[in-house]
Image: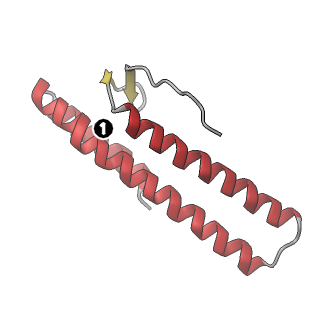
Amino acid sequence: MSQDVTYPHTEHHHGEGQSTHHHVHDEDSLRRIVNRLSRIEGHIRGVKTMVQESRPCPDVLVQIAAVRGALDRVARIILDEHLTECIARAAEEGNIEAEIEELKAALDRFLP
């Protein structure tokens, strides 16, 4: 199931069109994140199948909790990379305030 995926260094948009900067991340890191998301996608299909097969509700809930945990782990990886790469780059470029405001807005939507 090996796929050759290329992640070009492209422009990346934060927020609702608020700003644009060149968003460059390590290709290995991107590949790991995409692989994790693919596994989560498969896990969600499995939960859907469980519901269609009328599996016991507690079993379905346990699997949903596992999906949530996996998504939270991916979010932590993405946040960590954002802090180490994007925020650091914004500081070097002199636009740290705008980048931090965008991060705060994203966290407001992300966190319950």
Tell me if 80 is positioned left or right of 41 in this view. left
Numbered disc total:
1
Q: Which quadrant of the structure image shows residue 2?
A: top right
**Residue 20 pos. (x, y %):** 33, 21
- Amino acid marked by disc 1: Glu
| Image quarter in which the N terminus is found | top right
**Residue 105 pos. (x, y %):** 34, 44
Specify the color scheme. secondary structure
Q: Foreground residue, 22 or 30? A: 30
Disc 1: which residue: 102
Tell me if 25 is positioned left or right of 91 in this view. right
Tell me if 105 is positioned left or right of 46 in this view. left
**Residue 112 pos. (x, y %):** 44, 62
Which residue appears at 30% of the width and 38% of the height?
102
Q: Please tell me whether residue 30 is drawn above or below residue 7 in the rendered image.
A: below
Local crowd size for mark 1, using a 10 Å CA cut-off: few (<14), some (14–19), many (≥20)? some
Q: Foreground residue, 39 or 73? A: 39
Q: Foreground residue, 78 or 38? A: 38
Tell me if 108 is positioned left or right of 39 in this view. left
SS at circle 1: helix
Which residue appears at 22% of the width and 32% of the height?
98
Q: Residue furthest right?
A: 53
Which residue appears at 43% of the width and 20% of the height?
8
Which residue appears at 29% of the width and 49% of the height?
80
Q: Please tell me whether residue 45 is drawn above or below residue 102 in the rendered image.
A: below
Q: Please tell me whether residue 74 is drawn above or below residue 64 in the rendered image.
A: above
**Residue 40 pos. (x, y %):** 60, 53
